[in-house]
Every structure is written in C-alpha cells, then in structure tokens.
Amino acid sequence: MRSTILLLLLVCAAPFATQAQVLPIGTIGNVNNTSYVYPNPFDNVLNVALPTQQTAMCRIEFLNSQGDVVLSQVLPWTSVVAINTSSLPTNSTFTFRFYTDNQALLINQIVSKRRATLRR
C-alpha cells in the first residue's frame, strides 16, 4: 500500500519537478544576483550582502525625500557591510546608494528606518 502511494506521488510530481528552479545561496529577493540590502525596514543597522568583492573600498549614501545626502561613508568592502544608521531619523524613508571606489553604482534602493523597539 505504501509503495503504491509513493509511486502515485512520484508520478504526479514529475511534471512539476522538471520546472523547479534552484537558486544559488544569497539570491533570494535579489534582482541582479549580486547584492542585496537587509533588513528593510531597519533599526540602527542596515546590512548589505556582497557575494563578490569588486574593489577594496565602497561608498554608501542615504538621501532624504528632498534628495539631500544625510549620511555618506567610505567603508572597507567585505562580504557583508554593516552600516551604523543610528544618526538617521526614525520613521523615515531614504534612497540608499552603494558605490564601488571607482564610483560605479551597484545599488539604488528605497529603504525605511523604523522606530527602535524596546525589548525587555
């Protein structure tokens, strides 16, 4: 009985198995399969995952809704760049830009900073 049920499940699932897509690690939610920003919305740290190192340094910018740069930093390139955003106002939306040290724009994304939650 069990073998009959298992065989039936395999026969029914076969057409769907050929259409399955296997994504490489680090590409979930990633449009261009090279980098992604998380979490969004964020509290006091925004992370940028960068699977391949392109330059020694990188530059990040946060722009407010008027297009003014409210935070700009040059940081060393690592697989995950953690950005301290405690100086940014809470409950705000920003345009986040990530550049290589030769000014190539890699990420241009809207991000939101939420109010820090009190944990007990």
Image: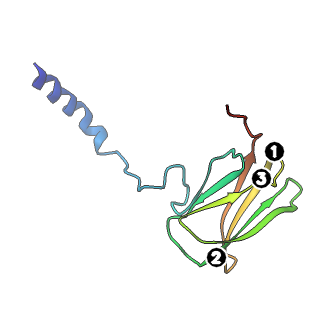
Question: Is 26 on the left-hand or right-hand side of 83?
Answer: left
Q: Residue furthest front?
A: 120
Q: Closer to the camera, 43 or 52? A: 43
Q: Judge whether 59 appears above or below 120 on screen.
A: below
Q: Judge whether 118 appears above or below 23 on screen.
A: above
Which residue in the protein does label 3 denote? 86
Q: Amino acid at mark 3?
A: Ser
Q: Secondary structure at mark 2?
A: strand
Q: Could you tell me how far apart the alpha carbons at marks 2 and 1 are, in whole angstroms?
A: 28 Å
Q: Could you tell me how far apart the alpha carbons at marks 1 and 3 are, in whole angstroms?
A: 9 Å
Q: Amino acid at mark 2?
A: Met
Q: Amino acid at mark 1?
A: Thr
Q: Earlier in the sequence, mark 3 or mark 2?
A: 2
Q: Earlier in the sequence, mark 2 or mark 1?
A: 2
Q: Closer to the camera, 120 or 112? A: 120
Q: Residue furthest bottom?
A: 102
Q: Could you tell me how far apart the alpha carbons at marks 3 and 2 are, in whole angstroms?
A: 22 Å
Q: Judge whether 114 appears above or below 103 on screen.
A: above
Residue 37: give x, y in percent of width and height.
62, 55
Residue drawn at (53%, 63%), measured in percent from left and top? 34
Which residue in the protein does label 1 denote? 90
Q: Secondary structure at mark 1?
A: loop
Residue 87: give x, y in percent of width and height.
81, 55
Other residues around mark 2 within 10 Å, as few (<14) / some (14–19) / many (≥20): some
Q: Judge whether 90 appears above or below 4 on screen.
A: below
Labels 1, 3: front one = 3
Residue drawn at (68%, 52%), measured in percent from left and top? 45
**Numbered label attached to residue 57:** 2
